[in-house]
Amino acid sequence: MVDALGNPLRFLLTPGQTSDITQARELLADYEPYRVIADKAYDSSSFVNFLRARDMEVVIPSRKNACNPRVYDSHLYKERHLVECFFNKLKYYRRVFSRFDKTDLSYLGFVEFASSLIWLR
């Protein structure tokens, strides 16, 4: 999760086969953002209802096979590139993208360390 400037806020480490939507509520647990911008992986009616119940603006496009596509602000959705840009900055650190660490805890620790270096730039 990143803020409106692309700075990291929170990480959750999951296995590669785990869907993104399973961690969405936990990512937002302590935050009260005005809007949530996410990709189609977060298009779940229960998650969208959860966000709307908390009075957050939902900027999540519907999947292409949706019966009733959701209306969203396409200009705001373009700001989602900040997440992708952050991942590219994070992959600058070779230890992150090649996963040299043996344990999840040490890997997550280095991801947080690299994120703090990115934040301080």
Image: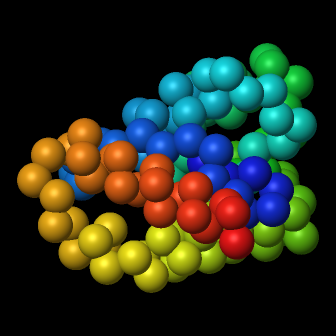
Q: Residue at x 28, y 71 (%)?
A: 95
Q: Residue at x 75, y 51 (%)?
A: 3
Camera-side residue of 19 and 92: 92
Q: Is residue 53 left or right of residue 9?
A: right
Q: Position of residue 46 (x, y in %)?
A: 58, 25
Inspect this view and state whether residue 65 appears: no
Up/down of 81 relative to 6, above or below: below
Q: Residue at x 36, y 55 (%)?
A: 110
Camera-side residue of 85 and 71: 85
Q: Position of residue 45 (x, y in %)?
A: 61, 32
Camera-side residue of 84 and 111: 111
Q: Position of residue 83 (x, y in %)?
A: 63, 65
Camera-side residue of 101 and 69: 101
Q: Is residue 16 left or right of residue 63?
A: left
Q: Residue at x 61, y 67 (%)?
A: 118
Q: How is the image coloured?
A: rainbow
Q: Is residue 98 left or right of residue 9?
A: left
Up/down of 90 relative to 62, above or below: below
